[in-house]
Image: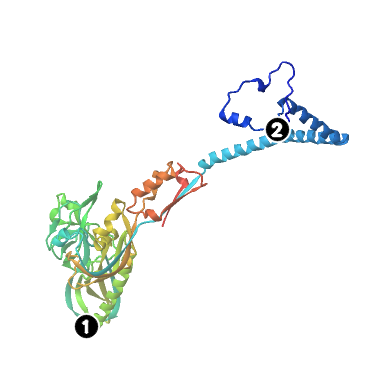
Amino acid sequence: MPRRVEDIIPGNRRSIRDVPVPRTKARESRSSVDEEVVKIHREHVPQVVEHVREEVESEIKPEHKVEHKAVKEKTKKKRKSHAPIIISSLGVIVLLAGLAFVFSGHFAKATFTLVAKNIPVHISGTYIIPSANATSTIASTVSAFGYETVTLSDVSSTTVPATQGTYTETKSQGPIIVYNSYSSQSQRLAAGSRLSGVSGLVYRLNSSIVVPGYKTSGKIIIPGSIATTMTAEKAGDTYNISTSDTISDLKFVTYKGTAKYSALYARLTGAVSGGFVGTTTIIAPTLLASTTATAQASLIQVLQSRMLSTIAPGYVMYPSVLATTFAKPTVVPIDSKNANLTVGVTVYGVIFKKTDFAKFLAGASSTSPFSSAGFDPKDIDTLSVIMSNTKDFSPLKKTNLVARINGSFSLIGSIPVDSLKKAFAGITLSKTADIIKKYSGVIDVVHSSAEMVPPWVTVVPKDQSRISIVVK
């Protein structure tokens, strides 16, 4: 018979063995197998654990028990004493981090590096350029662009050997510019029209002219103008006017008493010379020719340098493109063996407005991408511009300029820095990308970038002084 260890059931407490359990096939099969069953009651386990603990503690020496207890108490005290310090330190760190985060936004800086759009232009060919004030077919149908002129005059005097000649009378001549602030329509003036200033001396136009009408800029009237020459009505040096003399505007006598008298006028641009009455002084023809040519060449160079140094911003002038007129040389005797030879020169420099000239040369297809923001024609002043119709070109007659032009320049987008700063202020960094895209006509968006300091700030400062825009 197999051996069985039965549970000890005190009193009348029921054992789990007394609870009826439904019988299954699996249970019935197991009951048929002879096995040794060992049962352990749950109430005995705590007694065993307690017995083992008592035996272990009995092996520990008394002094060790005291020491172990002291270490535990010391550790607890250290933990209790360090806890407030750690908690306070963490609080300070969190507070400082919060303050740093808040104030970093107030003192943040934003830097935008914007690359301007660059379109290279290569030029090689012959171009016909009308006058800006011309009304020719070319000016009206091909392009609204045209050349403008600036005028400078001066005289040079030299003492040369001479001999006495015959009695003679000559009239003074000089360059002037006629202005029209009377009407926006052109005004025609015939050759011989009389002009006079406060001196009462009368001069006459050498040729017929058409003075362009005035233009307006807001409420400001910009008079139309044209350069021409005049001659004194009578002979004699009384009519001579040097560049150092003070002279009033010259008015057209025929318009006295009308609105045109004060609104259609002329001003000197150089000396009025050549007036003489008396015995002439004769200079040898070859000496007269060589001295005159040398003086004229020197004057042209001086006037051209002066003109180049006074060109208004936004305009360009090429040294090879100019026209000249020469006053008749005058000879004034000094004594029986010497005379004073005076030579007068007027230089007409041809100038172009840079942006208009670039559009004319590059064409609409190259300049249209810049839209209304505009562009800067970089290096356009380095082009080689050579006049082809030197003999036929006349700024006074507003003839077309024919020029051979070679070289390269670039169209650089004009980035509106102030407008962008205003648009960037106070918005998130992500939204600035949308604003930059609106200026893609002048900005190379792909190669542009933005940076915030400190880097965790995501909003651009409202203070525009803390926004930097670097244009490359």
Tell me, for residue 285, which label it has, or none: 1
- In which quadrant of the rendered view does residue 326 lie? bottom left
Tell me, for residue 36, which label it has, or none: 2
**Residue nearest the viewer, comparing 313 with 375:** 375
Give the x, y percent position of residue 315: 30, 61
The quadrant the N terminus occupies is top right
The quadrant the C terminus occupies is bottom left
Residue 270 in view:
no
**Residue found at x 27% / y 79%:** 291
Amino acid on which disc 2 is placed:
Glu
**Residue found at x 46% / y 42%:** 459
Q: In this view, does 435 lie to the left or right of 273?
A: right
Q: Is residue 10 left or right of residue 401?
A: right
Give the x, y percent position of residue 362: 26, 62
**Residue found at x 12% / y 55%:** 254
Classify 275 as above or below 41: below
Give the x, y percent position of residue 253: 15, 56
In contact (CB < 8 Å): disc 2 and disc 1:
no
Q: Which residue lies furthest to the front in this view?
A: 1
Classify 100 as above or below 322: above
Q: What element carries label 1?
A: helix
Amino acid on which disc 1 is placed:
Pro
N-terminal-most mark, 2 or 1: 2
Which mark lies nearer to you, 2 or 1? 2
